[in-house]
Image: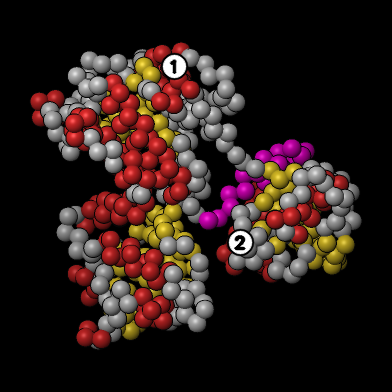
């Protein structure tokens, strides 16, 4: 019989590595597991950061009131086979990503983490959790005599492998096992090119990878002589060639080893594309974006503000739902334009009954932001120093506005003039929402002299931090330290 201390150590180190790896890949993340080693044993849970608190009714229904939570497995076939995993059904819980499996050493295991709203795709995260299933099965099969404690380290550094596994899985669906492009060198080249500047300018443009057998189906604008095709690992040369396709509908074409030529970005065949946008970029498989890359590493982050705080702040005002939604859509369009073009700006959403007087360039008459051409003009005016003054009538009343106000206690000199001006201004004008976009920081939202932050208050349970608990016992407990027990989407 496996020693309880050994099992606890496996769980603790694997959860820690998984949590730290996903936090680097997707932003601050939590992880949890529900498992049972033998069919006759009692289900256990380890949820050190209360990820699953608030989901008790659904977990009660799935695991205690229904016997179908584990797909039956052939225990004779799976006996002592840690590397043969029978997938178990995703629990489909709102706000969570879950992946599970069964093997000879571990009859059932289900791993959980957050479904962050600003991720490109959940597929790499699912691959990450699949590897956690594999590692835990492997460790339990080896027993304490052969346990190396390395699973946590593997999961901590799994980002590139998760992207690799995701691409291989998607390629397998479209092409079967006959997939010739070696993905690891491609992923290494994508990052190498992203870090290579040309005359001080960061890379822009697209690089598309096509299976060699599909090259003759591509309609090339220009195809390079076979003996003179630039090598993919010659990052400097490829970076120079990207200049021929930047800010255009063209892309460089590679078969995984060399740059074959230049073609239209609309490729019908199965393909992997790296889209360079300066200091960051996006990696897609077919039409599906699976991750981004930035500062020499891969991430699930879209690097685009979701503006949940704006959406919530608008609910505090007596606005028609359609008006509130229109304001949100206009602000989102302006913010994303600034993010894409990498400049800082400020937007004042003035919801007071009488327009606030702000020093700036007034417009007569105000510009209607419901029209695409005038919204585009407003986006251009946001580049001018000063804020845009937007009213609930969805009109731009002024630009280049100077925000002033009395000093407030929570100012932060490290954040710059836009940040602190927004604090002061909203402190004096409580019926305004101010959105600040910085060229090198996340978008900040202000109301009533405070920055609005959508933060998760992760709390720890002392009982569950080090040791798994029986699931039925965990379901009966009430964690008094948990501030919000309602999961996202409920």
Decide which of 144, 93 is in the foreground and name it.
144
| Left or right of 362, for residue 133 | left
Q: Position of residue 360 (x, y in %)?
A: 85, 65
Name which quarter of the figure residue 304 lies in.
bottom right
| Left or right of 288, for residue 81 | left
Decide which of 385, 466 is in the foreground and name it.
466
Q: CA distance from mark 2 to mark 1?
A: 44 Å
Q: According to the image, label 2 marks what residue?
A: 440
Q: Position of residue 368 (x, y in %)?
A: 75, 61
Quarter in which the N terminus is drawn? top left
Q: Is residue 43 visible?
A: yes
**What residue is rendered at 33% in x and 84% in y?**
222
Q: According to the image, label 1 marks what residue?
A: 475
Name which quarter of the figure residue 359 lies in.
bottom right
Q: Earlier in the sequence, mark 2 or mark 1?
A: 2
Graded by Cα atoms within 10 Å as few (under 14), some (14 to 19) or many (20 or more), the crowding at tag 2 reads few
Decide which of 193, 367 is in the foreground and name it.
193
Q: Is residue 238 above or below residue 489?
A: below
Instruction: Point out the stretch of residues depicted in magenta.
Output: 303-322
């Amino acid at each position: 019989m496996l020693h309880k201390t050994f099992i606890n150590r496996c769980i603790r180190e694997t959860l820690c590595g998984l949590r730290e790896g996903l936090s680097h890949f997707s932003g601050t993340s939590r992880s949890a597991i529900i498992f049972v080693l033998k069919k006759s044993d009692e289900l256990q849970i380890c949820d050190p950061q209360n990820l699953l608190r608030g989901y008790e009714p659904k977990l009660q229904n799935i695991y205690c009131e229904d016997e179908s939570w584990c797909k039956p497995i052939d225990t004779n076939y799976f006996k002592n086979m840690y590397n043969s995993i029978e997938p178990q059904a995703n629990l489909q819980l709102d706000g969570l990503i879950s992946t599970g499996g069964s093997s000879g050493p571990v009859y059932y295991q289900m791993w959980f983490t957050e479904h962050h709203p600003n991720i490109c795709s959940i597929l790499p995260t699912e691959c990450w959790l699949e590897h956690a299933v594999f590692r835990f099965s492997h460790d339990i099969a080896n027993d304490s005599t052969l346990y190396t404690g390395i699973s946590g380290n593997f999961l901590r550094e799994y980002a590139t492998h998760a992207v690799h596994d995701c691409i291989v899985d998607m390629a397998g669906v479209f092409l079967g096992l006959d997939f010739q492009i070696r993905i690891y060198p491609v992923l290494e080249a994508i990052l190498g090119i992203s870090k290579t500047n040309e005359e001080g300018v960061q890379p822009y443009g697209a690089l598309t990878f096509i299976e060699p057998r599909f090259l003759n189906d591509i309609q090339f604008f220009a195809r390079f002589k076979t003996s003179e095709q630039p090598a993919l690992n010659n990052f400097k040369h490829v970076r120079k060639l990207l200049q021929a396709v930047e800010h255009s509908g063209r892309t460089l074409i590679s078969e995984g080893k060399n740059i074959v030529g230049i073609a239209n970005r609309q490729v019908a065949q199965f393909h992997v594309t790296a889209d360079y946008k300066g200091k960051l970029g996006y990696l897609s498989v077919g039409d599906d974006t699976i991750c981004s890359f930035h500062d020499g590493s891969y991430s699930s982050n879209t690097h685009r503000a979701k503006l949940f705080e704006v959406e919530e702040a608008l609910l505090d005002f007596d606005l028609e739902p359609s008006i509130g939604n229109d304001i949100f859509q206009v602000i989102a369009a302006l913010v994303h334009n600034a993010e894409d073009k990498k400049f800082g700006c400020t937007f004042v959403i003035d919801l007071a009954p009488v327009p606030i007087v702000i020093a700036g360039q007034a417009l007569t008459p105000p510009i209607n932001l419901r029209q695409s051409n005038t919204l585009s003009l407003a986006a251009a005016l946001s580049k001018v120093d000063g804020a845009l003054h937007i009213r609930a009538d969805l009109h731009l009343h002024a630009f280049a506005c100077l925000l002033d106000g009395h000093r407030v206690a929570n100012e932060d000199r490290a954040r710059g003039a836009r940040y602190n001006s927004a604090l002061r201004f909203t402190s004096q004008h409580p019926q305004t929402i101010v959105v600040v976009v910085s060229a090198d920081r996340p978008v900040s939202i202000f109301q009533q002299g405070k920055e609005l932050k959508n933060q998760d208050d992760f709390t720890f349970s002392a009982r569950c931090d080090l040791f798994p608990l029986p699931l039925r016992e965990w379901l009966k407990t009430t964690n008094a330290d948990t501030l919000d027990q309602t999961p996202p989407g409920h």
